[in-house]
Image: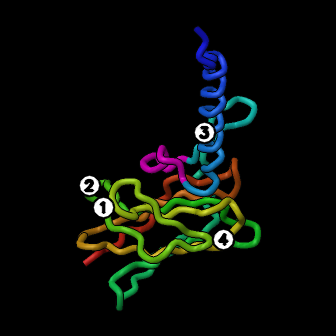
């Protein structure tokens, strides 16, 4: 009895669909940080020759300005990363961590923009990230502590290019009251 159904063809279609889904997921990372970077702050950028990941640049060579400015009227903080013509930003990740618990706290506020989107790594919109790998001279996001009080440090990763990035740099401590 033939029912018009070929198991070999079905498996071939299934493998093709799974491969296409995996390829789409791998190619989607230029528009956001991958979930694995939520805690590690390391971009998933494998070398084409070995497949092993590129290593971050030394922290003392960080060419960008990281600025955290309190916005007194709204009780929020504006977090900015600024480069120059020679040091554009292709990708970034920002989180505020409680100094005592070493856990992300608060959330980023506002609407996603052309350069910035907000992601949930732990709770709420606790992570600010890039929307594309297009070069940007500066990026900024507004962070709200919500009900948190204490000291935070902003953890930042910045990618200048696919293979040149600085990982998990820390701001000075910021007192939130």
Measured Cα–Cα span from mark 3 to mark 2: 37 Å
**39 is within the stretch colored magenta:** yes
- Quick check: 66 left or right of 90? left
- Quick check: 84 left or right of 171? right
Which residues lie in the magenta part?
33-42
Q: Secondary structure at mark 2?
A: loop
| Nearest to N terminus: mark 1 or mark 3 | 3
Q: Secondary structure at mark 1?
A: strand
| Nearest to N terminus: mark 4 or mark 2 | 4
| Nearest to N terminus: mark 4 or mark 1 | 4
Q: Residue 83 has which mark?
A: 4
Which residue shows up at 41% across the image and 58% down it?
A: 120
Which residue shows up at 47% across the image and 47% down it?
A: 35
Say which residue label 2 marks.
101
Q: Quadrant of residue 17?
A: top right
| Nearest to N terminus: mark 3 or mark 2 | 3
Say which residue label 3 marks.
21
Measured Cα–Cα span from mark 4 to mark 2: 31 Å
Labelled pair 4, 2 in contact (Cβ < 8 Å) = no
């Amino acid at each position: 009895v033939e029912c018009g159904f070929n198991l070999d063809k079905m498996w071939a279609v299934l493998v093709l669909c799974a491969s296409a889904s995996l390829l789409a997921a791998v190619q989607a990372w230029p528009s956001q940080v991958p979930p694995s970077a939520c805690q590690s702050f390391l971009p998933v950028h494998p070398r084409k020759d070995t497949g092993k990941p590129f290593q971050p640049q030394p922290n003392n060579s960080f060419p960008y300005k990281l600025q955290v400015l309190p916005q007194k009227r709204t009780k929020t903080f504006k977090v900015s990363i600024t480069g120059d013509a020679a040091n554009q930003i292709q990708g970034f990740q920002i989180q505020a961590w409680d100094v005592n618990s070493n856990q992300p706290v608060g959330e980023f506020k506002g609407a996603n923009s052309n350069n910035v989107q907000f992601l949930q790594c732990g709770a709420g919109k606790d992570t600010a990230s890039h929307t594309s790998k297009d070069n940007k001279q500066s990026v900024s996001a507004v962070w709200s502590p919500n009900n948190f009080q204490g000291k935070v440090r902003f953890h930042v990763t910045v990618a200048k290019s696919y293979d040149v990035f600085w990982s998990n740099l820390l701001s000075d401590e910021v007192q939130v009251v």
